Structures are given as C-alpha cells and as structure tokens.
Image: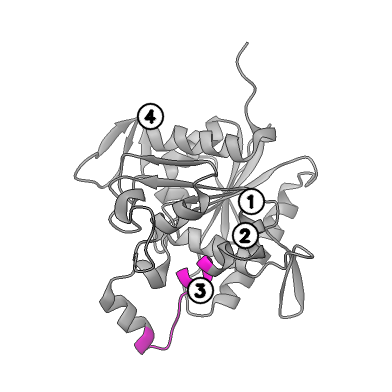
Amino acid sequence: MSGFTLKSRSWVRKHPNPRRVIEFYGGEAIGVTPHLSYGALFDYLYATEQTVIAMPVPIGPNHEEIARVLLEERRLIRKWLGYDPEQMPYCMVGHSIGGQMIALLASLTDIKTNTITIQDDQFKGLMGTPLLFMAPYIGDFDAPSWASWLVKALGLSFKPTMKDLIAMFESEQAQLFAKAGLLSFAGDTVAGNVASCPEPIAPTCQMSIPWFHHFLKKHPCSEIPGDHFTPMGTLIGDRVYRLSLNDFSEPFPRKVDTELVSLLDKLNPSGAAAPPN
C-alpha cells in the first residue's frame, strides 16, 4: 500500500515502466480514501506493471458538479503523469457507486465528437476507453425503499438512473460501452448477482447486476465467489485482511485481484503482459 503520492485530490502510484494506467473510482464513503480501502487490490495492479490513479468519489446531489470535479481531476493527473496519450492505454475501473460515476461521464459524452462540455469547459469523452464495472451500484435502483424515499423527500437524485442506463444501452450511445466489461460477485446482496433476475430479464428486476450482464454478456464478464465488499482489503505480509465474517483473511493475490487483471487484459489487449518465455 506504500508508494502513493497525493496529487490534487487523487492518490497516484506511478509505475516506472507501466503497460497501462488504471483510473479507479471506488464506492461511496469507502471511495473517499481509496488508497486505503482497496490497498491490496492496488498492490496487485502495481505488481502487474500498472500505474494506479485512485480517484476519490465526490459526494453530493449536483451530478454536473461531480462530473466537472472528476473530469478536471482526470485532466490534471494525466498531465502530471506525462505519458504519451497515443502510446499509453488508460482504463477506467469503477466499484459500487464508482461504476455509476463512470456511467455518469459516459452519459455526458457526445458520441459524435467524443467530448464532454460542462459550463463552457470541454473535456475528452469516454468513447473508445476500456471500462470495467465491478459490482456497479446504481443508487436510485439498488437503494433500500427508505433510502429512495429520503432521496426524493430531499429533492435529490442519482444520475444516471437505471432507466437512463437502459435507454443508453438500447440507443446509439451503446457505442460508449463497446469496450466495457463486468466483474460481479455471487454473494453480492447490495448490487445483486447474475442469478438475481434470470433471463429473460423482466422490467421489474430491481438489481443492477442482472441488467449490466444482460447488456454486456457478449463482452468480457466474470462472476466469482464473494460479496459486494470483496475488492476491499489490506495486504500484510502475504495475506489480505478485511472486515468480514466469512473471509477475514485470504492469501495474496486473491481471486478478485487476478480476475480483475485478466478482464483488463481482455478489454485492453495492447496493454496485456507478454507471455513468459
């Protein structure tokens, strides 16, 4: 978990000879200090020759402002890293509500120009970017009924909603997800799992994983044992520790670590490690 440098609002672990850059968006609250919450996962990404940008997820009701903060941070960190954008592949990984943040940026992308315009400022869009959704949590969809009621009572909203995302997948905006993949967990009771709503998926399905799998099933997808918080953990010695009643301690690397890199290699073959001689 050592080796991170704080740049602006993000924690960056710059590999001396990276094969790709990972822009990581964590879950709400746990994503505020991602370099701590996902320490073991980042250790494995770095060990497999990847620069890691741990982007803290802003919390608030103004999603245009959240998007602006994320995009400004992304532009600043990319400039600081100094990699040739034509040579160094970038991939975006979003866990839990971090997946919704990636979907938010995708929803704002103009597919004709691959740009995002916010308050007269223009940013590069997500067209052609490998996107890996890891147990994506869509706030309006997966939240308990009391939470949904409170959100509406306060006049807040989660964007994009699952309805918005389904509309994107079923329109020409689906091009934005041409290089998207999904990593889900069989024991996830927060965002669900593939079996939560069997195919053919019904409009009444109230979990986001079945919907993501429905639209991305021809893409690189994997469901492994674990729960919603399996990606979290701290590496101490050769074992990973996290607060859990089921798997408090696991040998490193874990299944989630190796499966994440495997999916990234499929989404971004040019950045895949060379096979051993």
Q: Position of residue 164 (x, y in %)?
A: 52, 72
In the orientation shown, which residue stands out farthest toward the left?
245
Inspect the image, locate mark 4, and give the three-letter code of the amino acid beneath it: Phe
Q: Label 2 crowding class (10 Å Cα cut-off): few <14, some 14-19, many 20+?
A: some
Q: Report the mark closest to the observer, 1 or 4.
A: 1
Q: Which mark is residue 252?
A: 4
Residue located 67% across and 51% down the image: 129
The disc label shown at residue 178, or none: 1
Measure the C-alpha gap from mark 1 to mark 3. 21 Å
Q: Which residue does the numbered mark 3 point to in the structure image? A: 159
How is the model colour-coded? one colour
- Percent x, y of residue 99: 49, 58
> Label 1 crowding class (10 Å Cα cut-off): few <14, some 14-19, many 20+?
some
Of callouts 3 and 4, the N-terminal one: 3
Q: In terms of depth relative to the viewer, which is nearer, 276 or 252? A: 276
In the image, 178 versus 64, the foreground residue is: 178
Is 125 or 30 nearer to us in this picture?
125
The answer to which quarter of the image holds residue 79 is: bottom right
Pointer 2 or 4: first along the chain: 2
Give the mark nearest the N terminus, 2 or 3: 3
Q: Nearer the viewer, mark 3 or mark 4?
A: 3
Label 3 sits on a secondary structure element that is loop
Residue 145 occupies which quadrant of the picture?
bottom left
User: What's the magenta region?
Assistant: 152-166
Residue ID for mark 2: 174
Q: Amino acid at mark 1?
A: Ala
